[in-house]
Amino acid sequence: MAGSSRGIGRAIAAALLREECKVCVTGRDRNALSETTGELRKQFGDKVIEFEGDLTDSAVVDQGLAFVHRHWGRFDVLIANLGSGKGNPGWRQEESDWERLFNINFFGSVRLAQAAIPYLEIRGGSILFISSITAIETTPAPLPYSAAKAALVNYSKNLSRAVCDQGIRVNCIAPGNVLFPGGSWESHLRNRRDEVELYISSEVPQKRFGTPEEIAGLAAYLVSPVSSFATGGCYVMDGGQSRGI
């Protein structure tokens, strides 16, 4: 479970644990990871393990997957919740910004999936990518971020065909504006509340933010056997914001 020490990833981890799954919680921030793991272990005991590291790094990915395999002997689900929308507005973007945001939001998930497929194909399994509404809708988000998330949606759909014969399902979720402690929307509200509230009320028909738990419910469904006919899809949960699909 990549990127699960806070926000959407943490909510997905909790949702899977409630469904009797075993979960490896991961993150780069030692304090956030320890706090999340400790709280989840109070509820779910030894069904929770943790791995600290930057999962956009190929060497760290290999270490993390090997760690999970040693601990449990197998795993059936990979959730790639990797990304950051921190970047500059406008059309003039430095090449370094394109490279940085594509590495975080696209290539990191690709590396993780490619490394995990040999483990998953032994028994079949499920891969779920977390993209963004910016992949499918015009938004004020930084251009490299939006393009990287769009590339992830396309990769997910094509990968689903490439690994279907191995019994692996691949899906993607494109969340809308989700508010949680420590997230980017919390910072935006703190710095420019009136502008943000106007944006949400005018662009989102439900006139509110989503919650991590709402995204987590969809994620748990998509990786479960109940959704065994679902592969190659991008599932949008955005309060009705997107217009083009």
Image (cartoon, rainbow, N blue to C red):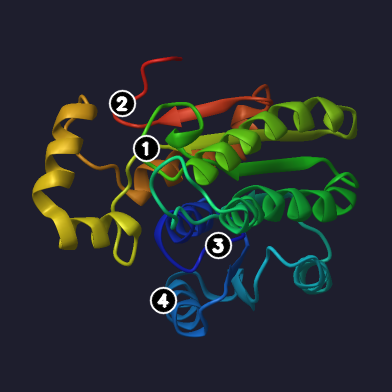
- Marks 1 and 4 sit apart, C-alpha to C-alpha, by 27 Å
The quadrant in which the N terminus is found is: bottom right
Q: Which mark is residue 176?
A: 1
Q: Residue at x 24, y 42 (%)?
A: 209
Sequence-wise, which precedes: disc 3 or disc 1?
3
Count neighbours of disc 1 (C-alpha within 10 A) and say few if under 14, some if 14 to 19, many if 20 or more: many
Tell me how far mark 1 sits from mark 2, CA to CA: 7 Å
Q: Secondary structure at mark 2?
A: loop
Sooner in the amino-acid sequence: mark 3 or mark 2: 3
Q: Earlier in the sequence, mark 1 or mark 4?
A: 4
Q: Which residue is mark 3?
A: 3
Q: Are marks 3 and 4 in contact (CB under 8 Å)?
A: no
Is residue 195 shown left or right of residue 243?
A: left
What is the x, y in percent for residue 172? 59, 35
> Residue furthest toward the left?
194
Look at mark 2 in the image and give the residue it sits on. Answer: 241
Q: Amino acid at mark 4?
A: Glu
Q: Are marks 2 and 4 in contact (CB under 8 Å)?
A: no
Q: Are marks 3 and 1 in contact (CB under 8 Å)?
A: no
Residue 35 vertical position relative to residue 202 in the rendered view, above or below: below
Compared to residue 238, the image places residue 130 above or below, namely below
Circles 1 and 2, Cβ within 8 Å, touching? The answer is yes
What residue would you read off at disc 4? 39
Element marked by disc 1: loop
In the image, 177 versus 95, the foreground residue is 95
